[in-house]
Image: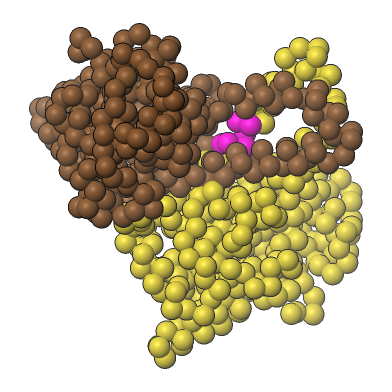
Chain colours: A yellow, B brown
Amino acid sequence: MPDKITIALDAMGGDHGAEVVVPAALDFLKRDAEVDLILVGNEEVIRQHLGGADNPRLRIHHASQEVAMDELPSKALRGKKDSSMRVAIDLVKQGEANACVSAGNTGALMATARFVLKMLPNVDRPAIATAIPSIEGHTWVLDLGANVDCTAEHLFQFAVMGSELVASIDDEIPEPCIGLLNIGQEEIKGNEQVKGAHDLLSGSSLNYIGYVEGDDVYKGGVDVVVADGFVGNIALKSAEGVAKMVSHFLRTGFKQNILTKLAALFAMPVINSFRKKIDPRRYNGASLLGLRGIVIKSHGGADVLAFENAISIAKKAVHTNVPERIAHGVEAQLEKRASA
Amino acid sequence: MPDKITIALDAMGGDHGAEVVVPAALDFLKRDAEVDLILVGNEEVIRQHLGGADNPRLRIHHASQEVAMDELPSKALRGKKDSSMRVAIDLVKQGEANACVSAGNTGALMATARFVLKMLPNVDRPAIATAIPSIEGHTWVLDLGANVDCTAEHLFQFAVMGSELVASIDDEIPEPCIGLLNIGQEEIKGNEQVKGAHDLLSGSSLNYIGYVEGDDVYKGGVDVVVADGFVGNIALKSAEGVAKMVSHFLRTGFKQNILTKLAALFAMPVINSFRKKIDPRRYNGASLLGLRGIVIKSHGGADVLAFENAISIAKKAVHTNVPERIAHGVEAQLEKRASA
């Protein structure tokens, strides 16, 4: 753990840019006494949003460009060498920051982070991991979209990375159990990659519990669910879709007439407490794993509270040195496999 | 359309067997004046559940064996030639029934149906399709688990079959628009199969609207969503998981104390109307597409109402001759492609 933690924030990234990132930084510093923050982006814009607010643990690092939310990753990588996103990652590479947080374009963030920071030894691809709510608390899922065609070995590496991440930063889960996302039908069970990953995981020293299905993510009983990015992303988006549908039907249902509006008043405390439990803002901050540095992706539409949560995740990852843990974890698993 | 419609029911299939299938058959006949039903299974057990009830449009066809819910498909296919599932499908093959409905083991039903009925010309693999609720009504999705490793051509065939199925049996959707399930990230968008299917679909005369994401299934705005069985199954199960989580939190929330219990009384009409909208029983009955015959899969845990719904879907599929429409649809698309 470093003496002092410094986190670089891409102040221009996301749907709201500095409008969210600057107040989130100020709020975070109020709650936190250990971390220094660097706001990376257009100095003038940042100063406008600071509105005179000052904090000795906050500084601005000017960057002249911005990566658009719909910009092609390859274009951002080639053409935006002074973007707020790129400079925030550069600061991590140069050791001026211990981690960076961006709400910008996922593809560009992934490509830039990989180019600048490079992969850890024995890790082939970066993966995106986040926690999502479940009946029993929450479940971590990776990969959420960085990799669409994965081999068994890739899935295996995701499992090791997910296990190390969660053991490091999730106080509630010191020894995460790992499940491999699959479908339930016997015999036609699993595609070739999933079957191969199952064999690799069964022979590992990870706390591997076998196959899980899509609904197990939300039931609980498994701490880390591993999937390729195509499947993981679609599972997550489908779940988001259902959550939005439920909330739509409840909202319109309670608005129907005077009686239902009265019912809403009575039901509100229950519905609000439920909303709070699954509040996506409390889960904001996905980790880009497998890199030689800590990069946290905030949701593009994050508000101040959500962005603060992403900064907290970055801080935890610095505290426990997640990249180093992952490097050791992967090495240990490879040694175990070689000696088997 | 045949003069008289006869549907064979696997009376022993599913978690509840004859206990659900027999009353569902009796209820269905009360509501329906056109269809004859055949209860296939252990005659003694069926008679017990009939309890003396009699209907000239209902007959029993004895079958001495049953396929267990966890039985391997290959084992059921080889060893259970007189199972209620097999005999129900045989009746379709022999022309004694126009369709069959089973709540039994999906893998065994798929394997047996494919073996007995054979595939339609130019269709490589059967697919499972069902409607699921959305904000705007419902969305049809296929494949839901029959195929785990699909080529672009398979996905294309699923799209044609889904389009023909929905145009045939869904009165609300005469010209279904088709979306291909994908993830949102640019550049890394889609795996190779999905990209290939996108090209095939773009060149077809289907009402193809391009890529959709997991949440679009529940938003509405697309009638048929095409995916390989691995992805489709995981998307569906994830959504089921979220729905169960929501219902768990609402239930426990409203049970917390005397105030929340009172709130529940007020909120109940709204919550019930919402529950009704997404009631899985109203959506029960998945179509096995691509076969030379009509086979409808009921959910294993279906109750009487849900099983009746599956019988209604079978009836509609007979009415509009779904297999013939699919055969024509596939042929027309292949001709279009050849002439391009």
Q: Residue at x 43, y 30 (%)?
A: B49
Q: Nearer the viewer, residue B301 or B42?
A: B42
Q: Give residue A1's quadrant in the image.
A: bottom right
Q: Position of residue B155 (x, y in %)?
A: 28, 40
Q: Is residue B124 left or right of residue B319?
A: left
The spot of residue A107 in percent (x, y) is 50, 52
A138 in the magenta segment: no
Q: Nearer the viewer, residue A97 or B266?
A: B266
* Position of residue A17 measured from the top left corner of the image (x, y, whole percent): 69, 45
Q: Is residue B203 above or below residue A126?
A: above
What residue is at 19 percent from the left and 34 percent from the top?
B90
Q: In the figure, is residue A101 to the left or right of B31?
A: right
In this rendering, is residue A234 above or below A253?
below
Q: Residue at x 73, y 50 (%)?
A: A282
As rendered, which of B69 and A55 lies closer to the eye?
Answer: B69
Magenta stretch: give its range: A241-246
Q: Residue at x 85, y 34 (%)?
A: B260
Q: Main secondary structure of the magenta part?
A: helix
